[in-house]
Amino acid sequence: MQLGFYFDQSRCWGCLACIVACKDWHDVPSGPASWRRVVTIEEGKFPDLSVAFLSTACYHCAEPACVEVCPAQAISKREEDGVVIVDRNKCREDAHCGIISSNGTVPQLTIEQEAPCQVSCPAHQSAPGYIALIAHGKYNEALNLIRERMPLPGVCGRVCSAPCETVCSRQELDKPIAIAALKRFASDHATDSIPQPIPRTKEEKVAIIGSGPTGLAAAYDLVRKGYGVTIFEALPVAGGMLAIDIPKYRLPSKVLQRDINYIKGLGVKINTNTALGKDMTLDDLTAQGYNATFIAIGTHRGVKLPIPGADLEGTLIGTSFLKEINTGKKVKVGKRVLVLGGGNVAYDCGRTAIRLGASQVHLIYPESEENALAHPSEVEEGSEEGIIVHPSRTFTRVLGANGKVSGVECLNLRSMCFDEEGRLHIDPIPGSEHVLEADTVIFAVGQAPDNSCLVGTEGITITKRGTISVNPETLETGWRDYLRERSVDKTVDAMAEERQFATDRLRGWEHQFVAAMTCTPLCRHYDIAQTQAGPLPLRGETRTP
């Protein structure tokens, strides 16, 4: 890891204490602390020439990432004394390496100068760094770099929505680099092992309600800061919606468990079959000595639209449908399945129905085909498996015969939009009523938190959208200066959101507080079979050795 900072040279005594302290704080194994790179800055022309000297804070790391990242291979580490050097004859000055800039000066390390993929990533992953390490065959080092900001590399490599790939500079040439797939590759091919527990350095301990991506990420950051951390999970397995709502063909249980075992190895305790409101209360946790409680209960409750026929035999809720499948229950679907919704969960339901024996699966959603909510990879893979889509349609009622589903009545739409409060507004085409036949209808039109565990808790208010009302800046609820989380809809966003809690809100312990977060993971899937260093795969591409 390459680090850097700036200082007032007119007041510097040259004691190097700042370098030693910074290396110690970041736990960076480094070379000789007495070496510094000094560059000259010249502005203007004679006789109005201004000259200044700046010293870069290069730490001459034991294994500098900049050496691997440099596309021109201009950076190397001198064997005799461990000093990192730059070959000016090789340096093309066309990449931000953190050492050199186009004008020969110390680069201003601002977010605008970072790679677009890193800026767009909610977790701020160093994609250029771990991709370069993978290209050099250093899979263990790549995985370690990923884990600096990502507690679930195996999971994220499979289910991340990959906003980084939408801004990848490579697409200006051909296609974006398969950044998410490479994260998965590093996780699958590194020599992974259970880490040693991190010594607890702080007296305070934190209770986390929920072991989904948000809860696990919060626990990961907090235990690394030296706090005692215990997760309480209502389900019999850890992982939350990652474990019960994402189909196994997308996220195998062993991959999720491997990431969870790593977090547990750091010292995080996970108590399953322990539900808030049933087995304990917030007051109980306070009495047990927890100084903070972080509620990350997820959005497990599926939504069924209040339309006629929604309660007929043969109507299912998407989240419940997936949960029953993932927990080993036998679920029967008809030969002709209609899924109401066009997001990633809808595609998960449709593709799962195909695997259960459905001969036809149709998706109906109000958005146009160009504005479909599902990720493009979901749409492509669903189409390959035979899913038929019906965009720009709304569903008015579920039809039935003898108490069982027989079809869905639909209307074609000219347009649709959501207002600021999330309410849907549609412009139907008069006379476009039609019926799509079905013997199973699955509602996949949205999800909400199940806040029944908080009913009766004084000071906690539930909003119209089903989330917990909080101060948007501090995440504080009204219960004894406690906090809660915001609602997000992607796994990687959930893990990034919790950093506000783990980093900012635990600086002071004057009051106890509760934080809460809810997330709905989106799914991605790539098949990468590459066992040696070589050309990097493009997005959606599979390569074998």
Image (cartoon, grey):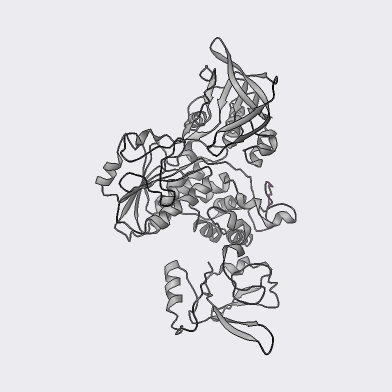
Nearer to the camera, 426 or 445: 426
When the figure is inspected, residue 98 is found, relative to residue 444, above or below; the finding is: below
> 146 left or right of 545?
left
When the figure is inspected, residue 9 is found, relative to residue 483, above or below; the finding is: below
Nearer to the camera, 452 or 228: 452
Residue 123 shows in the view: yes
**Magenta stretch?**
531-544
The residue under the point 54% across, 75% down is: 58
The residue under the point 42% across, 38% down is: 237
Residue 236 x/y as whole percent:
39, 36
The residue under the point 47% across, 71% down is: 29
Question: Dividing the picture into quarters, in which one does residue 77 lie?
Answer: bottom right
- Identity of the residue furthest to the left in this view: 287
Q: Verify whether residue 476 appears in magenta.
A: no
Q: Verify whether residue 535 appears in magenta.
A: yes
Residue 147 x/y as whole percent:
50, 56
When the figure is inspected, residue 241 is found, relative to residue 223, above or below; the finding is: above
Label tally: 0
- Identity of the residue furthest to the top in this view: 402
Q: Main secondary structure of the magenta part?
A: loop
When the figure is inspected, residue 234 is found, relative to residue 15, above or below; the finding is: above
Nearer to the camera, 456 or 424: 424
> 225 left or right of 281?
right
- Identity of the residue furthest to the right in this view: 173
Question: Dividing the picture into quarters, in which one does residue 69 lie?
Answer: bottom right
Residue 391 shows in the view: no
Question: Dividing the picture into quarters, in which one does residue 279 lie?
Answer: top left
Nearer to the camera, 159 or 342: 342
Residue 113 x/y as whole percent:
61, 65
